[in-house]
Amino acid sequence: MRSVVQRVKRASVTVNGENVGEISAGLLVLLAVGQDDGEKDVNWMVDKLVDLRIFEDDKGKMNRSVHDVGGEILVVSQFTLYGDCRRGKRPSFTSAAPPESAKALYERSVEALRSRGMKVETGVFQAQMNVELINDGPVTLLMDSERKF
């Protein structure tokens, strides 16, 4: 699993002009599922997202998690994080999981975040979405459950 994680003051996602998910301060997570991903990847990603210390403490140091600060999480599916641009001009997406299995693990990730007590909003899987955000910091991180970066 791969994700781009952004600390935000607010974020929202719309489909066909309709707001389908919106959060105040917290994390915007663009999430992609890879060919070989499974439950262990879901668990790794969810644990990392909930406990990642990227919010400032009283001394201005990034020492608090989204859970610690009572933040919210907006999770948006983003298979293009598995795009391989090393050859040619058109990205290859062969490392991304097929839609059926990707959707199941995406939904499992959202359920796992909610079971950890997080308020979670989502986009619509496989929809053409518009995402708006105010990045706080800015703070943007890349995460990969196989620890490739």
Image: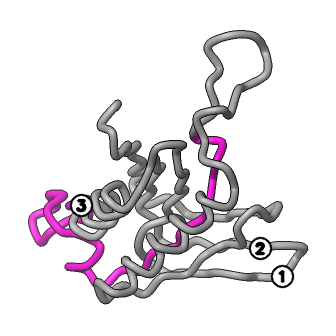
Residue nearest the observer in this picture, 116 or 142:
116
Q: Secondary structure at mark 2?
A: strand
Graded by Cα atoms within 10 Å as few (under 14), some (14 to 19) or many (20 or more), the crowding at tag 2 reads: some
Q: Position of residue 36 (x, y in %)?
A: 46, 43
Q: Which mark is residue 97?
A: none
Could you say which quadrant of the image residue 93 lies in? Answer: top right
Q: Position of residue 114 (x, y in %)?
A: 39, 85
- Please tell me whether residue 53 is drawn above or below residue 10 in the rendered image: above
Q: Badge 1 is on which residue?
A: 18
Q: Are discs 3 and 2 less than 8 Å apart at CB?
A: no
Q: Badge 3 is on which residue?
A: 52
CA distance for labels 3 and 1: 31 Å
Q: Which residues are magenta?
A: 52-81
Task: Look at the image and say whether residue 53 sits in the magenta stretch.
Answer: yes
The residue under the point 37% across, 43% down is 144
Q: Are discs 2 and 1 less than 8 Å apart at CB?
A: yes
Could you say which quadrant of the image residue 148 lies in? Answer: top left
